[in-house]
Image: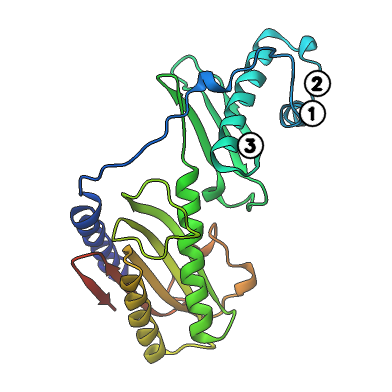
Amino acid sequence: MILKKLLAIMTAAVLAVCAAGCGKNMEKATKHYMAADYELDDPAQLDDWQINVLKSKGLPTDYNKLKIGQRDSIYRMGMMHRYLVDKYGIEFEYRGYYQSGFGQKEELIVMPEGADRNDSRSLVSVRVKDGEFSDNYGDYEILMHIEKMYDDYARDYFGSDKVRVFARHVNCNDIGDIDFEVTETFDYKLGSESLVFISDEICDSEKCKAFSQGLLDYSKVNELTGWVRITVVKDVDFSTLTNSNCTDYFTDQHIAFDYVISFDETHAELYD
């Protein structure tokens, strides 16, 4: 029953968010990153990143010793990598590449340097359409920022490290590119679906409800949209709790108390 009720709440929350926040017609100043801007006069001049990719695949690092298809691939990968570094100013690690053809779109898969290799949220996809590069790194950046916001709030609230937060999906972004260093509130144009886990060693039912209300108020103050599931769990080793395995603990064996908060510009609800 609890899963059916939760599904209904989440579905209603998503519909409400889309209707109230993400359905707005916003004008965005978009910078275009054309693939042609990242071409080189001499494809044989490989940079360190391209050389490391070739080494990881056991291929020659001399461009002239590569097969024709390999030359084309490493050149295209280099273009996409330069685009990412130019756009975000950080380094990315190679994870995979798919050539175009036979129904497959060209795609480079990377991850931000230093990100958790076991966390699927860190995988960044780069594609090209109509001669223009695009990527989904912005979603990762949003998730990490919202996750830190909620995690800092929870740790300060309980004064303990026996809490974990996972921002799982971006469900609204009508802001576009965001400078989180200077942006404190989000005008209900940014939101996520998140999970909060709290140990039953530091939280009972009354505290969980009070914390959930506090987190709801905090979300409204920061003008976010979305929903958060807050779960007090028992018999869980928090040092091993990750984004990849956290949903394994949504069982009667581990759940002590469960709340969901849902919020956008027009509503703020707490469900038990």
Classify mark 3: residues with Cα within 10 Å, few (<14), some (14-19) or many (20+). Answer: some
**Residue 55 numbered mark, or none:** 1
Which residue is labeled 2 in the image? 61
Which residue is labeled 3 in the image? 95
Classify mark 1: residues with Cα within 10 Å, few (<14), some (14-19) or many (20+). Answer: few
Which picture quadrant has residue 2? bottom left
Q: Position of residue 77 (x, y in %)?
A: 62, 25
As measured in the structure, the alpha-carbon distance from the residue carrying label 1 to the one carrying label 3 is 13 Å
Identity of the residue drawn at 47% across and 68% down: 149
**Secondary-structure class at tag 1:** helix
Amino acid found under the numbered disc labelled 3: Arg
In this rendering, the answer to whether 256 lies above or below 19 is below
For the residue pair 239 and 169, the one nearer the viewer reads as 169
Amino acid found under the numbered disc labelled 2: Thr
As measured in the structure, the alpha-carbon distance from the residue carrying label 2 to the one carrying label 3 is 18 Å
Q: Nearer the viewer, mark 2 or mark 3?
A: 2
Amino acid found under the numbered disc labelled 1: Lys
In this rendering, the answer to whether 94 lies above or below 64 is below
In the drawing, does residue 269 fall left or right of residue 90? left
As measured in the structure, the alpha-carbon distance from the residue carrying label 1 to the one carrying label 2 is 7 Å
For the residue pair 29 and 153, the one nearer the viewer reads as 29
Q: Position of residue 129 (x, y in %)?
A: 41, 23
**Secondary-structure class at tag 2:** loop
Q: Report if the CB atoms under discs 1 and 2 are less than 8 Å apart.
A: yes
